[in-house]
Image (spheres, rainbow, N blue to C red):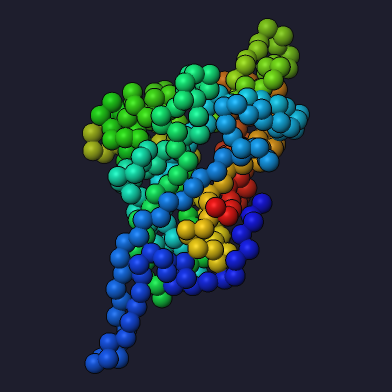
Amino acid sequence: MRILTLATASLAAIVAGCGGSSSSDSNTGESSRSSAVRTIEVPVKAVAGAADISCDATLLSLGTAGTSASLVDFRFFVHDLALVTDEGQVIPVALDADAESQNADVALLDFRDKLDHCAGEANPDFNDTITLNVDVDSELVISDLQFTLGVPFELNHLDQSLAQEPLRNPGKASGMAWSWQVGYKFTGLDVEPVGGITRPGNGTWSNSRWNLHIGSTGCSADTANGENPAPCDNPNRTTIKLPLEGANLEDIAIQLDYAALVSGSNLSLDGGGASGCMSFPGDPECPEVFKRLGLPWGDTAAVEQSVFSLVAK
């Protein structure tokens, strides 16, 4: 649920603190513009309903069965940050390449405050912030903040051992590799439901972890070849567009609600395949979470996502 209540504003207000300004040329009568790039840190919050995501938290009343669960992993990549004007113009916004856990192309959000599946020491790669360099014409009216969930295609299928952080594996991306699909897991949102997971009709099957791994599927061996990689059948990158509702960029945070993401799922039962949703066609746990992320699934068209929102910082 959005809690932004500020009045509608033009970009002049949104980036007033970003060094943007305009002035009139007394000789020509034309408007001239001067600006300076301003670095803005946008916090990212991960919650499950009213509870903050953390290794020590017990997440309550999840999914259709009201399951309780503990955290195992909670990471996701984002790229293609942009501002969208009231006329639909998309203006790319640069990621600060010097900030922790991001480069000029992609950022990794990591909400594990402990290592070793949330049972070890403090995680030095914990990251809940996206750092942006903003320089936009102050005459424009901005209506939305936009980003894409996942790793860009041109970076998703390269040698991970040579990748620039946060994509290096081993490195910050350890555990986010998806070797069977020649790429990365875009999300690693994994929990352990209390009481475990069973499979109807199969009394010998059980599992302790409900995984949510979104990534590109239908990727051939040619995908990783040379300068002309073959596209994957199912890219599975969703573009998230969030209304600013007049808020200043420096006053907002992006929020992901895991409870909303799994609200149509039963985390105590698994219908087949790998436990949870692994994005492969036919996985019975995927249609509900894909829908909530704004992704198409098979012949089912995408609908508006319902798990990310903007909230006050």
Identify which residue is drawn at 64% across, 55% down.
Answer: 2
Instruction: Kindly identify the residue that appears in the image at 33 percent across and 23 percent down.
Output: 170
Residue closer to the observer: 86 or 6: 6
Q: Residue at x 35, y 67 (%)?
A: 19
Quick one: which residue is furthest to the top in this view?
204
Residue 223 lies in what quarter of the image? Answer: top left
Residue 164, how many percent across, how many down? 28, 35
Q: Is residue 247 left or right of residue 57?
A: left
Question: What percent of the width, then of the height, locates residue 248?
Answer: 50, 63
| Location of residue 17 in the rendering, given as x and y in whole percent from the top left corner | 41, 65
Q: Measured from the top left, where is residue 86 in percent x and y? A: 50, 70
Q: Residue at x 30, y 76 (%)?
A: 33
The answer to whether one can see residue 163 in this image is: yes
Looking at the image, residue 79 lies above or below residue 278: below
Image height of 145 relative to 210, above or below: below
User: Closer to the camera, 217 or 170?
Assistant: 170
Q: Residue furthest right?
A: 65
Image-quadrant location for residue 245? bottom right
Residue 233 visible, this angle: no
The answer to whether 257 is drawn above or below residue 182 in the figure is below
**Which residue of the protein is positioned furthest toward the front in this rendering?**
122
Nearer the observer, 123 or 109:
123
